[in-house]
Image (cartoon, rainbow, N blue to C red):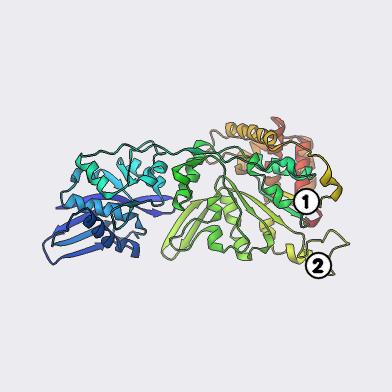
Amino acid sequence: MVARAYTVAFQGVEARPVEVQCAVTPGLPAFSIVGLPDKAVSEARDRVRSALSAMAIALPSKRITINLSPADLPKEGSHFDLPIALALLAALEIVPAEAAEKTLALGELSLDGSLIPVIGALPSAMTAAAEDRVLLCPKASSAEAAWVEATTVIGADTLGAVVRHYSGQAPLAAAQAGEIHTDPFEKDLRDVKGQERAKRALEIAAAGRHHLIMIGTPGSGKSMLAARIPGILPPLTAAEALDTSMIHSLCGLLDEGGISRTRPFRDPHHTASMASIVGGGKGAKPGEISLAHNGVLFMDEFPEFPRTVLETLRQPIETGEIMVSRANAHVNYPCRFMLVAAANPCKCGYLTNPARACSRAPNCGEDYLGRISGPLMDRFDLRLEVPPVEFTDLDLPSSGDSSETVAARVAAARNVQMERFREHIGISQNADAEGKVLEEIASPDAEGKELLLKAADRFGLSARAYHRILRVARTIADLEGSAHVCRPHVAEALSFRISARVMA
């Protein structure tokens, strides 16, 4: 008799179903696992044998064969321990075979039979729901998986508890979803003295999910401004929270099974490798751009990142997804993020200050910012020069609106966009609009169009820049509650595109 249980193999955010077949046949005693397992899966036989021994269950002196089907799909990870043990227990008639076949299981076994939490419980629950099966997992992972209400999730502490559950001795209760976390923000925009134009740029960027680059001397407040972006962003919607948590679940970043409604804010160091930024490595894991999905990717000291890393951002910025291709894996990850970059105007940082600039000015600025290619720079909707703050301004009282006030305006603008794009699949913010949709929503009035055409001709704007200016103008109009894009909206959008001296 062949007993069956089910589990998953991860390919990106997709959890593909895997059938675990167990056959106990006459022959020399052996325990083999076939079906393209990696080292961690092959070692499962020793962990399973020890866990069963701890429960006083002796394996028969027969040949035990575990097949992981489909056999040509790579199997990686320690989460195969529990489904292998479950299929073996069904083959030994310790648990009902019918119950095992209706279960999708994942979990790592310790030598004493305890179940150790594993990553990927949330996407596994999605697969279990699609396959109409019950999800069995370690108790520590069950709260995360229970967010998928379309399937029943059972969490167990030990393999013994699993046996008692299926034998009817001590049934386990269905798991409850973890808590919704909302991280409080103590950093307020009012903490930043001066820089009112920069604060306005942050508000526009947050309202329409526009990419922003800030260039200014050291200590002008670029990083301080960026750190306050999460405080003005609206919380994730239910669909966005689940979508983002799927990626974080694969990386083990969900705390105690809870789902966060706070938008991700990722700030990798400029020494990060290309694999860590865009994804890759063993198993083609998601990178920082995918971990920032539906949130913010802040890249400080932007020109200091390796050129190859910066150039790989060009396609994900446009498409909102990244295909990580390796010799043994081709995985597609979502990465619809808002890129915020900060840079000094030159290597010494004081290009715009004649009293402190180095002897190589202005050539040092051209060489330094020249590390950012033209095609990549063209993808920034907002380009902002952040001037240094005078010492006398530091003693002035806080000015401008608080993060709470700005967040309310941003949320109102985003609600307008959600309603506008309700019937458009794949579009939720102005930054996503293109083609006919962009022409319908962002066509300026006659004066605005005349201004835009003159600026495009005067500054040699590309077609991409032309459309990005229209998107920003539409967002500015949304912030003002205007149904139409007018000349002042176009003028402000242009000012953030072509006014910075260091961008000339």
Q: Inspect the image, locate mark 1, and give the three-letter code of the amino acid beneath it.
A: Val
- 304 or 48: which is nearer to us? 48
In this rendering, the answer to whether 455 lies above or below 39 is above
Please tell me the numbered disc located at residue 363: 2
164 relative position to 241: left or right: left
Q: What is the x, y in percent for residue 308?
A: 60, 65
Q: Residue at x 44, y 43 (%)?
A: 257
* Whether residue 34 is visible: no
Q: What is the x, y in percent for residue 469?
A: 71, 44
90 relative position to 72: left or right: left
User: In terms of image quadrants, where is residue 451?
Assistant: top right
In this rendering, the answer to whether 413 lies above or below 202 is above
Q: Quadrant of the C terminus?
A: bottom right
Please tell me the numbered disc located at residue 273: none
* Whether residue 192 is visible: yes
Q: Inspect the image, locate mark 2, and give the three-letter code of the amino acid beneath it.
A: Asn
- Sequence order check, earlier mark of 2 and 1: 2
- 356 or 439: which is nearer to us? 356
398 relative position to 315: left or right: right
Q: What is the x, y in percent for residue 321?
A: 53, 51
Q: Residue at x 80, y 44 (%)?
A: 194
For marks 2 and 1, give the CA distance: 20 Å
Mark 2 Cα within 10 Å, few/some/many (few <14, many 20+)?
A: few
In this rendering, the answer to whether 120 lies above or below 424 is below
Numbered label tally: 2
User: In terms of image quadrants, where is residue 149?
Assistant: top left
Q: What is the x, y in percent for residue 271?
A: 61, 64
The residue under label 1 is: 386
Q: Secondary structure at mark 2?
A: helix
